[in-house]
Structure formats: C-alpha cells, structure tokens
Image (tube, rainbow, N blue to C red):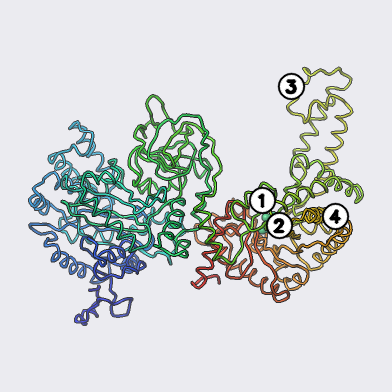
Amino acid sequence: MGARTPQTMEFGHLSAYGYRGKTSMTTQYIFSFQQGDGKNKALLGGKGANLCEMTQIGLNVPPGFVISTEACLDYLQHHRLPDGLMNDVRHHMQEIERTTGKTFGGKSQPLLVSVRSGSAISMPGMMDTILNLGLNRETLQDLIEATGDPRFGFDAYRRFIQLFGKVALGIPDEKFDAHFEEVKRQAGIKADVALDADHLKEISELFLQVVREETGRPFPEDVYEQLELAIKAVFDSWMGRRAVDYRREFRVTEKMANGTAANIVTMVFGNMGNDCATGVGFTRNPGTGANEMYGEYLVNAQGEDVVAGIRTPKPVHELAKEMPDLYRQLSELRNKLEQHYREAQDFEYTIERGVLYCLQTRNAKMNAAAMVRTSVEMVKEGLISKERALLRINPELLEQLLHPQLDPHNKIPPLAQGLPASPGAACGKCVFDADTAAMMGKAGEAVILLREETKPEDIHGFFAAQGILTSRGGKTSHAAVVARGMGKACVAGAEDIRVDVRSRRAQVGEVLIHEGDIITIDGGTGLIYLGEIPTVAPTVSEELQTLLGWADEYAELKVHANADTPEGAKKALAYGAAGIGLCRTERMFNAKERLPLVIDMILAEDPESRAAALEKLFPIQREDFVKLFTAMAPFPVTVRLLDPPMHEFLPSEHQLEDEIQALKKYETMIKGQRVTLETLSGHLTTLPAPFDLLNEEVISKAIAKKELMLKKVRDLYEVNPMLGHRGVRLGMSYPEIYKMQIRSVLEAAALCAQQGLKIAPEIMVPQVITAEELKRVKEYVAEVRQETETRYGLTLDFKFGTMIETVRACTRAGQLAELAEFFSFGTNDLTQATFSFSREDAENKFLPLYNEVGLLEDNPFEVLDVKGVGQLMKMTAEFGRHTRPGLKIGICGEQGGHPQSIRFCHHIKLDYVSCSAPRIPIARLAAAHAKLLEHEFFNHS
Ligand code: PEP
Ligand code: MG
C-alpha cells in the first residue's frame, strides 16, 4: 500500500498496489520485494530493483520492501517524509513480521532490519546504510535469549549504536573508536574477535553514553523512531558530500539517477557462530574476466567486516572445503544470477546457521581487460548477443587498457607485496590521508594514497591519487572496489606495511617510507616498490581486437588517426585506424635537424632566397610523405598545409636577447687574447656550440644571425597570434611555402604510384574563411599537379579539401563545397571561435568555476559542445552536401575521440572521426554505440 495523502484515506478501499506514477490523489512510495518491478531502477534504485527481481525468480532473499526514489525526492524537497509514509512502513513491517514469525521491537524472536541506500546508478559506498536496526535494551535481551549468545547480542548492539550514531545522529566515528580502542587496550586485546561478551557490553554502555553526550538525548529506544530516523538519514545521504562529489566526478546526471531508494531488509546474521559466514562474490573474476566464481568470505562475521577490510577474508574456493554443501549452493546461486541477468554479477551473501541468503546483486564493476574478455566469452558461450557485448562496455573504460605497465625487465626488487586489486602501474609520492592526496593532486603532483584501510569518506583522495595502497583488506575491500571502478591501480592488504599516520610514515621491516617518498605499485601483481620503476607501453590483446572487430561491423563512422610520423602511423594502425585524418605538417618542420632550414626560410628577405631555403626542405618533406603513405596504404592520409604562425619556429624574443648578450660578453673577452679552453671553461655552459666559437669571426657571424632573428621575431610580433597570420593566410602571403608542400605531397604520391602502391592522399587547407582563398590554393595544386604528372608520366589520384574551423567557413560551406571534395571540422579552433575564448586561458582561469557551478556542463575543448558548435557543424554539413551530395565530412579536433561527441557526429552523418592514436579503440567502440543507440533520445538542442 502506498503512502497516502489525507484525501486518499477516503479511498482506502482502493488498493494502491500496482499503481505507478503520481496523481493528485495518490502516489505509491513503497513496494514489497514480491511486488516491485525489477526493471524499474529509476523508481526502486538498482539495489531495490534487484532485490525484488531476485525474490521473484525464487532466490532466497530475506523479506523486505523498498521505499522509492520518488519518496526520497519528495522528502528532500519538503524536508519531511511524505504524509502517511510511516503508516505504510508499519504496514509493511507487519507483513515481514508475518512472514518471518519475528516481531519488530517485540518480545521473543525480535525482528531486526537493515536500512540500505541504493540509487538507479551504482555508487558503491557513497551513501549510507544502517544495520541491526530494531535493537534496544529490551530487544537486545530477547535477542540474547533467542540465540543464547550474549557475545553475539552485544556485538550486534555496539555495531548498531555506532552506525546509527554516525549515520542518523551525525556523531563522528572517532568518538566511538576511542572508547573501543581503550577497552581493547585495557583488556590487552589486539584483535576484535578476542573481545568477550562483557567487553562488548561495556563498549555498548560507553557508546550509549557517547550518544547522550553528543546529542543531549538518550539513544532512541522506540524502534519505529529508529526506523524513521534511519530512512531520513539514508535519503539525506543522497545529498551528502561523498555522493555529490561522486556524481560530479562520474557525470551522473539527474536523468541517470535522481535520489536514492531506502531498502528495508530483514537482518540475517553471518556472525552467530561457526556455521555462519558472510561473503562477497563475483560470477566471473573481475581482475582477469576468467569464467570462474571469485570472491572472499569470513566465517562468523558480519558483511561490513568483509567490505571494510577490517579482517582479511579467505578466497571463496576454501569454502568448498569448509562448507561443501553451501559452496555447492553458492555455485548454483552464481549460475542462476548470470543466467538471469546475462551479465557478470557482484553479489553479497550471508550464511545464517547453514542457510544461504542472497543480500544483493548488481552488475559487476570490472577492469577494462576483464570487461573485454567477458564480453567476448559471453558471446561465444551464447549468453549474450554481440550488440550487448559492445553496449555493456563504456568506451572510456578502454582507456585503462592503454595504461602503461611496469617494465617486465625491471631488476629493482619489490619492497612488499599485497593483493593485486586493480590493475595498472602507478607511481607517485606516498601520502597518508585523503585530504593531503587531494591537496597535492590539485597542485599537479602524482600521489599514491597509502592507508591502513580506506573508507567512503576518502573518496576525494581516490580522485586525486594515481594509485591506492592499503595494508589491510582484501580484493573486495572498499579500496579495491572503488579503485577498480575508477580504473586506478590498487594494491590491497599489503600486511607487511605498518602505517603510522600520526608520524606520517610507514614501515616495512627495516625500511621506513616517509610522506613524500616516491613509491610505485603494480595493481596487476600486487608488488610495491620504493622509487620510480620504468613503465612500458601497453599492447592490444586478441580479445580487444575481436571486440573492436565487432564494433566495426556495426559502426557507420570510420575512425582515423591524428598522426604525423611513420611511427605514429604504425601505432595508429595497430589500434585499428582506417586512415590518417590529420597530419600536421608543422610537426615535420620542428625536428632538430630541420629547424635551421625552416629558420633560414623564415629569415629569407625575398621570395627567391625563400625558394632556395624551401628547396632544401622539399626532399625531406617528400621523403616524409613517401614513408607515411607507404605505412598507411591503402588508407587515406590527409595532409594539412602549414598552419601555425611563423614566429612559433623561432626562439622567443627574451631568449634571443639573452643569447646575444652572452655572445657579446664572450666576444669582448676573447678579443686580442690567446684563448684557451681553460679560460673559457667558466662560460661554456652559457654558450651555444662553444667549440665553434673559439674564433672571433664565427662569433660575430653568430651575433649577426641572432640579431637578424631578433628583428624578424619583432617584425612577426602579433597581439593575437592564434587569430592572426596563420593557416591559409600564410599560404596567401608566402605561396612558395604552400607550393613546396603541395609538391612534396604530389611527388611522394607519384613515387608511391611508381612502386605500384595503392594510396589515397588528401591535401587539406587550414583556417579558411573565404572560397577565394580556397580557389587560389586549388590553383597552386592544379599547377603543381600538371608539372608532377608530366615529370612522372602518370595521372595522380588525390582529394582536395578544407578544414572548417572558422565561423565564417561554416556560413560559406555551400560555396566552399564547390571547390572542396571534403570537409574536416577543426573543432579546437571552431570551439575557440564560437566561444570567443582560448582553451589555455579558459582552463586556467574560469572554466573550472563554470563547470563547478553549472554554467557550462562540460569542458567544450574536450567534449563537443553539441548545442553550440554542434549546431554550426550540422548547418555546415547541410550546406556542404546541398552543393556537393556525398561530400566527405569528418572531424579532427580533440573532441573527435570523445564518445559523446562521436555520438553527435554519427547523428549528423559525418563519415569519419579522427583522434589521437591511443583513443582509437575508444572511438571505434563509441562509433558502434552511436549506431546501436541511434534510436534512443539524444538531446542536442
Ligand atoms: C583544430 O583546430 O581542431 C585542429 C585540428 O587544428 P589545430 O589543433 O592544429 O589548430
Ligand atoms: Mg586548428
């Protein structure tokens, strides 16, 4: 029955069961596990929906009910629970009492419940949960009587007081921990399990006193008051700092998850003796993806002990020896879960006096390698379709696979070893708390967060750290689960490390690690090293190749690479690029041995001397293109003509002034003297090429050249260089530069053709604003083409096109398409032009604020601004294709490698996206997603 407003009470005979959604009359806020729709995660939260679904497919789930996310939103809006909600809660509690034969707050067989948070999107550990609710002085006695186990009773009681005190009453853990540790100290006890009933009773009394002191009120004895406070606390935790930070970091929007449900679940106990246990399981190994049950358990323990890493649990296969029948049941549970959900599951279970209960299940968070392997294997096992195999992997996750690994030939011995909890290698300064990690991370330092164990409140430290290291806890501890979710390296349970946060150091045997010392961790092996260990580039696994091959079968967008060298091209091919979408030729100019030639070309005073300098560059560029085309054959290679302003190839004004000054000092020193190396030794480091300078004449020539450069640098000075003399404007001012580049491309193409290679070169013009510019460059191309075809006696096959990176080019796309055979959106510049701010200034000054307070959703230089820049692109594509149907269009700005941007590019029917090589696997998968999700709503207006 749902929560009712006073009006609906009049219609009490109308059952609200089965009713969905709101009307002015009634809203159903509560759903029993038998009744809730397991598919409706938005309403019931992921945990609640799964509890309902598991109950309904016949798994042994403790009875309970879900209070919906709508109730949470209503509560957060009005600062009180919806009218009548607690009445309905009572009704449902009575239902549980009937099923279990226990009584909530009652004599004999007291019913205890947990109140668990759970939103539509899994946010592990980010919101609050309360266990053992329903205990008070009276029910405690009943529990002890019913179980005949005072130690168990007091243990449950003290846990409840602390958890309830922290979550519902806002009392910090430390207030309780101090008493707990003191009792242990006085009793001379190290491990919690060694505490007896009297100790735990004493601790409970001390905890009750803490509550009185901290709140000015006794601990609530009324179990329904406890329940109400707990429900409110769980709802409040939706807006808690951890949850808010998490949503911001992972871009969990309101549409994806709005509010948390509160799940009220009958408590079952894994800590009632040695025929009890509690554990966490994965239906497949989340580290490797192997098709085997994986997990850990603790005998005679409560679930939080496993998750919090307070005791180090045993691997699940040991249960086969310890409780063979239950292990068999657990394997059955695992199979049923996978068969039903058709997805690897991460589940929690408890064995209470020999009976197995499943407490929760959710899709397993696995690292990228495991996701890829399970996708491929589940398709081969016939469990899922290829579409599902692709869609279950967030493309961004693949970035993990492209993480560096520790050099396998490393000879440095490890300092310690823990459990390999989340793969990847990470290196950084060791820090001992989350605040310091966050502070240093913000300052741009690489840090490794080293803790005894982590807690949900450490989440900001996780965001900032390169990797996480704990000295306690297992592979399913908080540290491991959260790090895996974030794709960060984690080593857990390195028990040889003794962490002493107060003195800001840790110790391994004789070795001390101070805060700030560099350490390296390998989340794939669990090894920990002192100092920095070299890393090696990752490789593309066979499984990833299979998966991306499937992605290509679905994707309509092709994925090209931004690459400028043959090595870059090979890397791009290894990642599966179907072409080079952007070869920035200026990078070819910047090589050390070429720069002097480029400088000579810039310093040239007239076209003839410039042509002479260019003549030296020509064969070098042609050779570059031959290599590039050969490496990429038969795929297209889009060569962009020179783009940056000339001064970028010259030293800065300051640097030149300093060098000239140093040379002059040097000149005075050696004038008329016999110079020896010794007399100069003090000055050698400040001078370029000192041995050449042992001669006065050489020095004065060097000074003259530097002075000429300085003059040129001053001549070339621009107030806004990025909006100045660059791109095609250079081609208009210095046609000989563009002609040399065009000749290099076309002669390289001719040489390749002579070798019988099938290649597809493309010449692309940057920064175009008028069709007239493009027309002139096209004339240069025609002229060079004719010369080259005559010289080589063949017909060249290539394309000519333009970048679209100015707003004017967008508006003139129809005219540009008369000349261009392809367009490529340069969304780095187009974004800058549309927003009228530069990336550098924006990211350094105001963009973080804009993102934080919601003035802008994303960084438009990373994620395509579909509502602004995207609209220009859409219009441009329409204009262009109106003139030239079938016009080839792509994107080569940074955003071309971002999944959300790729979805938009598919939506406006671009032909390809081009991105840096390591993003190619991400882009290929994202292109398949874009196709598979094309019928789903996509808001871009
Ligand atoms: C662009 O502007 O998007 C682009 C690819 O060109 P560059 O980044 O070289 O300016
Ligand atoms: Mg550009």
Q: Which mark is residue 126?
A: none
Answer with mark 4 or mark 3, whichever residue precedes in sequence. 3
Residue tagged by mark 2?
Answer: 637
Mark 1 secondary-structure assignment: helix
Answer with mark 1 or mark 2, whichever residue precedes in sequence. 1
Q: Which mark is residue 734?
A: 4
Write the residue at 54% across / 45% down.
538
Between 574 and 380, the residue placed more toward the observer is 380
Q: Quadrant of the C terminus?
A: bottom right
* Disc 4: residue Cβ within 8 A of ligand 1's nearest atom: no
Asked whether the beta carbons under mark 2 and mark 4 sit within 8 Å of each other, the answer is no
Mark 3 secondary-structure assignment: loop
Residue tagged by mark 1?
Answer: 569
Q: Please name the amino acid that badge 1 sits on.
A: Ala
Q: Residue 682 carries which label?
A: 3
Q: Tell me where residue 497 sits by quadrant.
A: top left
Between 927 and 805, the residue placed more toward the observer is 927
Asked whether the beta carbons under mark 3 and mark 2 sit within 8 Å of each other, the answer is no
Answer with mark 1 or mark 4, whichever residue precedes in sequence. 1
Other-residue count near label 1 (Cα within 10 Å), few / some / many at <14 / 14–19 / ≥20: many
Instruction: From the viewer's perspective, tell me whether residue 752 is left or right of residue 432.
Output: right
